[in-house]
Image (spheres, helix red, strand yellow):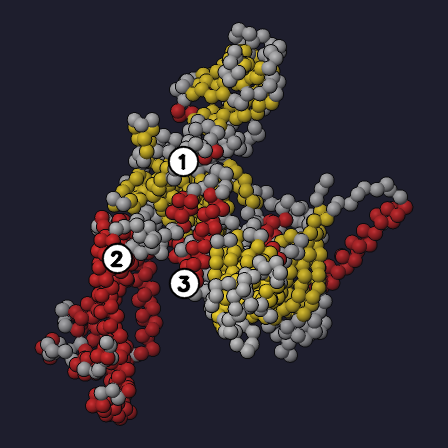
Amino acid sequence: MSENRKLSVEVQNAKNLMPKDGQGTASAYVIVDFDGQRRRTKTICRDLNPYWDEKLEFSVHDVEFMAEKMLELNVYNDKKTGKRSTFLGKVKISGSTFVKGGGEASLVYYPLEKRSVFSQIKGEIGLKIWYEEEAPPTPEKPDAAETAVEEKPPEKDKEEEKKAAEVKEEKKEEGKGEEEAKKEDKPPENTTPPPETPPTKVDAPEYQQKQTPNPENSVLRGNLKNRDTESKFFTKFSSRGTDRRVAFDLVDQMPFLYVRVVKVNILNPESESSFCAKLVIGTHAVKTESQAPNKVIDQVFAFEKESLNSTSLDVSIMAQKKGPESESKVESTAGTVSFDLLEVPRRVPPDSPLAPQWYSLEGEGSSGNDIMLSVWVGTQADEAFQEAWQSDSGGLIPETRAKVYLSPKLWYLRVTVIQTQDLQLDSGSGGTEPKVRNPELYVKAQLGAQLFKTSRTSIGSSNPTWNEDLIFVAAEPFEPFFTITVEDLTNGNTVGYAKVQVTTVDKRTDDRSEPRSRWFNLIRDDNNKPYGGRIHVRVCLEGGYHVLDEAAHVTSDVRRTAKQLSKQPVGLLEVGIRGATNLLPVKTKDGTRGTTDAYVVAKYGPKWVRTRTILDRFNPRWNEQYTWDVYDPCTVLTLGVFDNGRYKCDDKVEVKNDVRLGKLRVRLSTLDTNRVYVGTYSLMVLLPGGAKRMGEIEIAVRFSCSSWLSLIQAYANPMLPRMHYVKPLGPAQQDVLRHNATRIVTMRLARSEPALGHEVVQFMLDSDMHIWSMRKSKANWFRVVGCLSKAAAFARWLDGIQTWVNPPTTILIHVLLVAIVLCPQLMLPTMFMYSFLIIMLRFRYRQQVSVTMDPRLSHVETVGPDELDEEFDGFPTTQSMDQVRVRYDRLRALAGRAQTLLGDVAAQGERLEALFNWRDPRATGIFVVLCLFASLLFYVVPFKAFILAFGFYYLRHPRFRDDMPSVLMNFFRRLPPLSDRII
């Protein structure tokens, strides 16, 4: 039964439109196009803020590809009521943002976009968009009524053609310049969907296998040769409106031997016996699951071809039956079939899967027994690889499989506590305590483990009023309830509480719509008096914010929570995780030798990817490729390498945490578009004993962009959504909310199957970045010093000019000063041209993109053991009192120097303020007299002459200088600060 779907677009109103009728107003109407269908609203005459409130419906022809369709909305000025028909703006909305059933559909205001660079457009339009599922029509027998219905579509087609002709005629009468501007964005006029363009095939470039001379730097591989046709393997994926076919060209092909065992046919099976297939290739031996005779097994095995030490594959049927003891089983061979690996066919996608065949078994007792299987050589791009038994990752162990995780969708839940009424304050818990005359009350709200409180207020002549906002982080699926409690601080009793269902809370996308306020009855635990009053609150889920779960400087996603507000991606990020080399052992195997079971986690936006775990190898090769849609180029991709410590744990063994091997970050804004970066980077981890190199990782990164205009426009947009600036959150509040968001994401991913450990998520999200660290403080201080070093270098250069260290340069500066004074209009053009030339010359010597953690910038090599021990200490501390006292004294000494520096900075500002406030009457009097003479001097002397004279005086020869400080500096330093008044 096919699924029918109907799309509803409710055009509410528009605001602040551009007047284009020649009389300061506009008569606007809207044309909406979707999937080859066109609808039009009525015309609102002479109104720059029109209100339509019309619902337009569309049929979705292909439900599966609705997310790839675009809804285009154009606003025009009606020529029948104005002088001409002109364009007022357009909006394009991706089908992936549509919500279902109208439950989440809220009024969203979209800014009107330009049609061309020279268009004059402003304003916004409010829309509600949702879709509904419709039951397919039941077939009925043809009769006269049905025949009449079948005759109606031609009339309907004529009416639609007539309307389309009218709209086409209106467009023809518009100006020629506007018609040319419309060519690119002109909506379809036919009623049939346009044919889909076939996907283009991307050739997979070939990369050299040589290791780069400098492993710390990435190597750009360009102008690469194409691989042979047999070595191309593709995967097809859809990305909102375009059907793309991307080659796995960032990784190397890894040949695998695939064996698919489908079914076993036993001619005369014994009663109460089961059968399984046993595969033997050299030292590899593995069995399928036991099944009853003639039952489907359908299990796939993937053997890494490079690790095979045999040229033949033996597949045997093992008959299993109960032995004399109830728990033991006796196995016997029911036949064997052998394959020569040199004659196994090779399959390369997009070829169809190899069809399994029946093979007769040989050996004793195999008469009439057959097995259905297929054997082929493929790569890791084979669709059977993900669900197959894999030899390099331990088989079918869930904890070693490659998985993709998604972070939960996070919302900000805003609870505005307004006031309470009719509070029953005799006893909050049914006791006999006397009633307090002026109790102090506060309200606390709790969602899960999050608890926030309002300030205290006393009950006077009116009802208690707060008008305070409490903000929580809520994750889908939501908690069933959040609790609001009113408590009396004077006696510690609970006045009452109310439970609110989170699913009934209103959602809003911006600050234009105010959520409704609600009254809730307060319930008490006293059965005799269950009523405790009522509370007035305003609750809403904020969809206009982006809930930060990462640090702001390394965030990978800045999109708003509401799905309707999502925009089209500006590019595509492809990451090839190729392999690692020289990994250090982090645990022992069988108590005799060291080993490492490494895997990689990559995180960008809400999507987490985890490669398969390569067991017991110091040079693992993953060769897995993943893709992400990019919505903002100024974001960061994070990769972490870990040792898997969970795959051998069960209920009887304590679960071990995965060990960190290192982390990398790639800032997308530093990458050139449509180029491939392949490099080997060091893995470094900070341990209590110091920084340690754990090996190297080889990755390939490509940031593709189809539209340069969209990419450049992203640099003009604010980093965070609009709500962060209209209703900003305080820095302390943001830190608390980020900590709560990180904790929620960690808990949700830890409940996945297989689980992504909490230590992995916290390491990737830098959850401990707010913890005090002497090393990080030093690193940040030297970063500030490094930024100020350019200004210090300029000051030294200026001092060299002033002291005539290089006389020709000083003379040239004199000439430049004269030219600027005589022709001041050339100062800014000369400065910007000089900046242009200097920056363009530096392009040839720009640094190569590096994603390795910088140990020198991090100051991990100069940090002492005590400082490292302090950094790894928990919060609160677990050290002894003597150790804490030593660290406290050291922190006091550091804070003392910072305190002195702050006092010196404050003294300079106080001296300047004292000059104008007559704190020193003699100094201020001197300054007043100087101001009077300066005003008369500048009235007589031209400003150019003053600048020229001051420049020559500043650049005078050292023989005309004095070694003592200048008069102005002496005068300023003698002004009185307020430091003498501090106790």
Counting residues from the start of the chain, the first of labels 1 and 3 encountered is 1
Q: Position of residue 545 (x, y in %)?
A: 51, 60
Disc 2 from disc 1: Cα separation: 39 Å
Q: Which residue is under mark 3?
A: 732
Q: Amino acid at mark 2?
A: Lys
Image quadrant of residue 98? Answer: bottom right
Q: Which mark is residue 778?
A: 2
Along the horizontal axis of the image, is 793 left or right of 138?
Answer: left
Q: Which residue is mark 1?
A: 654
Q: Is residue 760 left or right of residue 532?
A: left
Q: Nearer the viewer, mark 2 or mark 1?
A: 1
Tell me the SS state at disc 3: helix
Coordinates of residue 113 in the picture (x, y in percent): 57, 64
Q: Tell me the CA gap for discs 1 and 3.
A: 37 Å
- Position of 193 with respect to 832 (left or right) is right
Q: Give the farthest residue toward the top.
A: 364
Identify the residue shown where x is 31% and y is 52%: 877
Give residue 697's position: percent from left, percent from top. 35, 40
Mark 2 residue element? helix
In front of the other: 441 or 232: 441
Q: 78 or 651: which is nearer to us?
A: 651
Kindly report which numbered mark, 1 or 3, lies closer to the viewer in this rendering.
1
Which is nearer the N-term, disc 2 or disc 1? 1
